[in-house]
Amino acid sequence: MKTCSIDYFEETVKKFPDKLALVYKDQRISFSQLRAACRSLAISILNANQDMTPHSPIGVFIGKSANAIIGDVSVSYTGNPYVNLDVTIPAERIASIVKKISPVCILVEESNKSKLEEIIRIAEKENETSILVIDQNMDHALSEEEDQLLADIQKVQIDVDPCCIITTSGSTGTPKGIVMPHRNLADYTQWAVDTFGFDENTIDGNLSATVFDHFVYETWLMMYTGATLVLLDSAMMLFPAKLLEVLEKENVNYIFWVPSMMVNVANMDLLSKFELPYLKMIWFAGEVFPTKQFNYWRRHFPDATFVNLYGPAEITIDCTYYVANRELSDDEPIPIGNACRNADVMVLNDDMKICGEGETGEIYVRCTGVTHGYYNDPEKTAGAFVQNPLHDHYPEIVYKTGDLGLINEYGEIVFKGRKDSLIKHMGIRIELSEIEHAVISRLKLAEYCCVVYNHDKKEITLFYEADEDISPAEFRKELMKLLPKYMIPVKYIRKDMLPKNTNGKIDRNALNQEVNHG
């Protein structure tokens, strides 16, 4: 019985020792080379932190690279959870995460050591968090004693032990650390393999930031199946054509991207300029994919399998999926589909009853994937990880997502936005995402937009991304064709580029702050 990620990785290395595991720029690393590097670094971690208690978080402050993967897997060899920290964001922001998680040690490359020292100082963790600088000398052959130490750690791992902690910002900007066990990731990865046939022939073009849950899953997919992971430099997100060049060069046959990047590719008509004959599996998740741009991709890859996935990190990657196997008009939302295997996704109304067809309700999830909650935050955990509202016969924790959905005529779930974006304006309930859908998908007034609410002034504000201003009068004229007067925004603010968070999604919290706090 396999209980942790290292069990799967060790089996894969035995099967495919010389097969390509990682590609990053000019680096090409086989599974046996990856194993050697990870085990060597694991010993260095253990030697530098001999007094740490079991399941102590270890930070990985490394930019997206082969070293980031080596750092994560090496921490797993020590039997501890890793927490990836974003090297690109301000020190104060990372310090708030370090203060919350309190890692016993943080791995870093020499180039970011001084920034990390500042972060630890700001977090006031100098006496609790050590720094381990990764260097090339760490790749050494293990002694018999060191080899046995790692084997002993692996033997005592159980599947509910934490594999990693995923950090995410809450609605107030206060970081949350989602504790994700090995069991959950194994269950999700096995579902993906069984449902879509991933194996050692999969070549994955990984665009996810290291702090994103998709990055964890794609690392697991590599360890679990022997797939090759092609790490796409995060800087390439500004140059979509370069991304496609790498996909073409490396014969990538699978991608799992956020829609915003795919929209950029569509808007620039880049798929007409590249031959990507191997790309046969295209997943997307994390935000709504405008159907017009989705249809562009679909026209260029008529033989590919397109899958829309949905799920908060709190339930481990995703809990629903929709294989796009019917035609969708440009103004029809792409469903999020039905529950993944071993998951039950419930859409409940305000009376805690299962919603009927066409009735909007909040999405609750019960499954093996429900994580352990938020690290060092019992109050937030209790608010989101709740007793199943459909019964009180025995303890059963489900995740209350705060997302809204409805069941369409096909029996599929359609995402309807956030519950916290459901406002009451002029005494009437309004879903702000409905306004966004009208702007982007139905009227096609802008490629990107975000609608927020100023609670003090009782004003609906629409931010949109465009090269030139669109007059408020034009917006109002077009929106009045679809929406009642009380849903028409009062203010319209153009930005050259809407703010994005680390995961590539529109940073709604930043726009809310701009409107409500100036």
Image: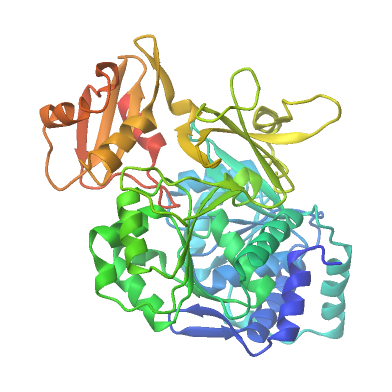
**Could you say which is closer to the camera, residue 29 or residue 229?**
229
Is 183 placed above or below 148 here?
above
Q: Quadrant of the N terminus?
A: bottom right
Viewed as shown, does residue 508 lie left or right of 144? left
Tell me, yes or no, if residue 151 can be seen here. Answer: yes
Front-most of residues 98 and 485: 485
Residue furthest to the bottom: 18
Q: Quadrant of residue 347?
A: top right
In-image side of 150 versus 426 (left or right)? right
Left or right for 463, reference 6 = left
x and y percent of residue 48 in the render? 73, 66
Question: To which quarter of the image does residue 237 belong?
Answer: bottom left
**Residue 237 in sight:** no
- Residue 46, above or below 85: below
Residue 113, image x and y in percent?
51, 63
Q: What residue is at 35 percent from the left and 23 percent from the top?
A: 453
Q: Position of residue 19 (x, y in %)?
A: 62, 87
Tell me if residue 358 comes above or below residue 8 in the rendering: above
Q: How many marks?
A: 0
Identify the residue at image location x=39%, y=41%: 507
- The image quadrant where one finds the C terminus is top left
The structure's colour scheme is rainbow
Q: Residue at x 28, y 16 (%)?
A: 486
Q: Residue furthest top?
A: 427
Horizontal placement of 6 versus 336: left or right? right
- Relative height, residue 411 to residue 284 (above, below): above
Q: Position of residue 394 (x, y in %)?
A: 86, 29
